Image (tube, rainbow, N blue to C red):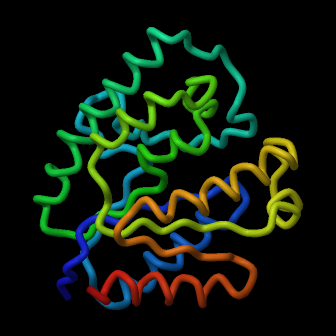
Amino acid sequence: MNVRTKTVSFLGPDGAGKTTIMALVEHELTAREVDFAHYYFAPGYLKRYRASGIATVNTNPHAGRQYNSGLVLLKICLMLFEFNMGVPKVKRQNKLVLFDRFIHDLLVDPRRYRLNRLRWWMNVLLKLAPSPDLMVIITAPAKIIQSRKQEVSLEETERQVLTYKSIANQFSRSLLIENVGQPEDAAIKIVSAIFDR
């Protein structure tokens, strides 16, 4: 079955249920015989952004040395090259492409990518990045997220939830999911949005 939507990115704080909902979405897409591909963060145009095949769990996403201003600029330019070259390439596969995280995640949690903090010019540069056909933002109340994962402080989780919600307004086609009910219901809502275009 063909769908007109080509790229769907899933954003949200750790512990909001993004992985669970994505798995349910993929199950439903398989049941509907939709051909799809799954990427983590980047399309893998450059070798450094390709999946290693080794599953890792990051329990401290803000650990490690943060980059200085020069390296921040270099890294963002490298990411822009990766996404601007890679996203059109994966779209040509003629299948639905699902991204677990996307370059716009930098606007919410720059420390995860060793960028220390959000700078005004990062917002400007990221306007050069390709936008997904559908941006799915999955959140939940901060205390619920903290009951599932405590990788960052409650204050940081609250900040991330608010920021993720606010960036939904930056995209022409976005879907905000407050994951407080049955995740199966959220998955069906997302699949409906994929087909509803």
Above or below, comparing residue 77 to residue 2 in the picture: above
Q: Is residue 148 above or below residue 159?
A: below
Residue 118 lies in quadrant: top right
Q: Nearer the viewer, residue 49 or 145?
A: 145
Of 54 and 60, nearer the camera is: 60
| Residue 195 rendering spot, x and y as whole percentages | 30, 87
Where residue 122 appears, as percent x and y from the top left, is 45, 31
Q: Is residue 99 left or right of residue 133?
A: right
Identified at 41% across, 18% down, the residue is 73
Question: Is residue 100 rendered to the left or right of residue 39?
Answer: right
Work out which quarter of the rendered image holds the N terminus and state it. bottom left
Residue shown at 43% from the left, 49% from the top? 102
For the point 58% across and 33% down, the residue is 110
Number of labels in the image equals 0
- 151 sits left or right of 27 in the view: right
Q: Residue at x 61, y 70 (%)?
A: 20
Report the quarter where the C terminus lies: bottom left
Q: Is residue 166 above or below residue 75?
A: below
Image position, residue 137 (x, y; %): 54, 66
Between 42 and 155, the one nearer to me in the picture: 155
x and y percentages locating residue 26 in the rendered image: 43, 75
